[in-house]
Amino acid sequence: MKKKMITICVFVSITGIAIMPALTVESQKIEEKTGQYKTPIGKRNTILSDETTWMKIFGGYEYEYGDAVQQTTDGGYIIIGTTSSYGSGPRAAWLIKIDKDGNEEWNKTYGGPGAEAAYDGQQTSDNGYIIVGFTDSYIENPDVWLVKTDVHGNVEWTKRYGGYFTEVGMGVRQTNDGGYIIVGRTNSFGSGDENIWLLKTDKDGNELWNKTFDEEGFASGFSIEQTSDDGYIIAGTTDSNMMCDAILIKTDIYGNEEWHKTYGGSAEDGACSVQQTSDDGYIVLGSTLSLEFGGFGAWLIKTDNEGNELWNKTFGGDGLGTVQLTNDEGFVFTDSVNSLLSQRQLRIVKISQNGRTQWIRELGTKSNDWGSSIQQTNDGGYIVVGETDVNGYGVTDILVIKTDKNGRSTVIVNDINEFSIRFFFQHIFLRFLDKFL
């Protein structure tokens, strides 16, 4: 889950800064091994409510995070995340392949003796997988890390990209030419303290070009999509105006900026997810603390094709998930919502094309749950991934929920307890450390 926009503005000043004269790119062989489980993966499976809905939990005795999910060409799903329970280092990138009913087909961990994480990925045109995140194995500071696998999760190649300081990849997409586009952040390149970083590679991960987008202070890119004109749209966060704002950057096919727009109010705001809409505009999900937008909550912004705002809506919750287009030309997003009188709940919100709320579902376990990524499935339902602390160990596991077309699955509202409130704030802080330090 991407607990990222608000915390970066508050805490990011503790990261290092520098400028490096040249970009270094190298291929690094990183150990890959199958996770060995102390207890069977998915052992805390749920409750099937009908043939099209289910809930599954994957994890061990340490922290696990689920950051992305996608339906695969065989009708199953690929889950992209990070594990501290399995792998050869303190953290490893983690791929879990499940069938249409949520049953595990295989899982793989990727990493060396240091820490690795995977924040985004997708199935590729050859039915393999691409994942992006960071690695600090064999180096002092993290580099952007790109891993390509075959259909069974076996490594075909890995690449790392970085300088003397910290680089992290947050989003990746396969491009129309078969290569890859990566967005994230860099402390090594550009004129700002921390800059949005865009990298284009060929099909084998060899860098073709890279661009930095320099804002005064700190800026980070979190979401990337190729647009209908073969350019790219980036969503992220910048504090160039002394407060964090959401930022959209539109580039051409070579990464040259065509325009950028910032969106924000009197307090901290940011963007974490973007999609191009059928009218060639954009839908952006983020978070806002600005009172003029309703105070703390999920923030949805609809723009035209030049980034001019058409409307914006707030929904409470945290807005720290993803937004996707739906078959009816509306939108759906996932995040989590909290009340001090109840546990944290994973939430799905369905919105019409003009921003009208159609339904809201709070789903999950009898404990704290967070939503990170959502996609509409071939049957018209939804698949969502996030985390839960239901295991009772004081750590999080990966939570995967399949719903019907109306977002219905297992819905539980919990009573509050002291541990759940304490764990909620602990979880937010640890996710900050995972993303930014």
Image (cartoon, helix red, strand yellow):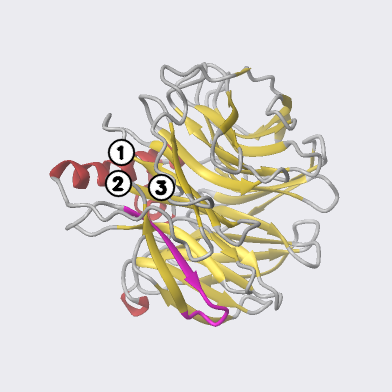
Q: Is the residue 108 above or below the residue 284 in the image?
A: above
> Which amino acid type corresponds to the residue marked 1 in the rendered image?
Val
Q: Is residue 221 left or right of residue 278?
A: left
Place residue 26 in its image quadrant: top right
Report the residue at 64% width, 79% height from top: 304
Amino acid type, residue under disc 3 in the picture:
Val
Q: State the SS at label 2.
A: loop
Report, in whole angstroms, how far the alpha carbon at label 3 lies from the one at label 1.
Answer: 30 Å
Q: Compare residues 242 and 254 and report the one nearer the observer.
A: 254
Identify the magenta region: 345-356
Residue named by callout 3: 12
Residue 302 spot, x, y in % from top left: 56, 76
Q: Earlier in the sequence, mark 3 or mark 2?
A: 3
Q: Residue furthest left?
A: 418
206 and 98: which is toward the camera: 98
Residue that numbered label 1 is attached to = 390
> Is residue 268 in view from this perspective?
yes
Q: Amino acid at mark 2?
A: Asn
